[in-house]
Amino acid sequence: MKQPKEKTAEEAYAALADRCAKAELCPADAQRLLLRWKVAPEEGERIVARLTAEKFLDEERYAMAFVRDKLNFSGWGARKISDALYRKRIPAPVIARAMEQTDPAGMREKLETALRRKMKTVRADGPRQLRDKLIRFGASRGFGLEEVIETVGRLVNDPEED
């Protein structure tokens, strides 16, 4: 694996500003890149503060974009999305505001669509094994366990309903 080139503080700032102009980054991602580029920690903090002041980095904007992308393109459930934001050190109030844009009815629809698609490809010896595999799949996608169990129960009992 190719080692990332060490960067000076100004090179790191320019590289991060360029990257932020193309795609949303959170401060934790920026810090991780600065560490890879071997920028001194105190210098890195100054760079992140400058990028935040200049609105290149914005936790709220990042969280909103992250939630939209994971809902629309990855098919993740609310739990998986909020956990991922937490791991990126986004504050809980910001996560809560970003999660307000989720539509519970739309989430149920996405879950059902994903489970129907998975049902066509899963190999199971019987309805019990099919049910268990679908529940694990739905839970791994970050949907609530109760919602997954209810939806799987409905689908396994009446799989032809479209």
Image (tube, rainbow, N blue to C red):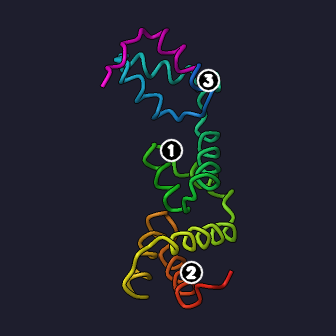
Q: Is 33 a magenta residue?
A: no
From this view, report whether residue 84 is shown above or below residue 62: below
Tag 1: amino acid: Ile
The spot of residue 123 in percent (x, y) is 40, 75
Give the label on residue 151, or none: 2
The spot of residue 73 in percent (x, y) is 61, 52
From this view, report whether residue 149 is shown above or below residue 35: below
Pointer 1 or 2: first along the chain: 1
The spot of residue 58 in percent (x, y) is 61, 34
Give the label on residue 90, or none: 1
Magenta segment, which residues?
1-17
Image quarter where the C terminus lies is bottom right
Pointer 2 or 3: first along the chain: 3
Q: CA distance from mark 2 to mark 3?
A: 46 Å
From this view, report whether residue 81 is shown above or below residue 46: below
The residue that disc 3 covers is 53
- Labels 1, 2: front one: 2
* Residue at horizontal 59 percent and vertical 26 percent from the top: 20
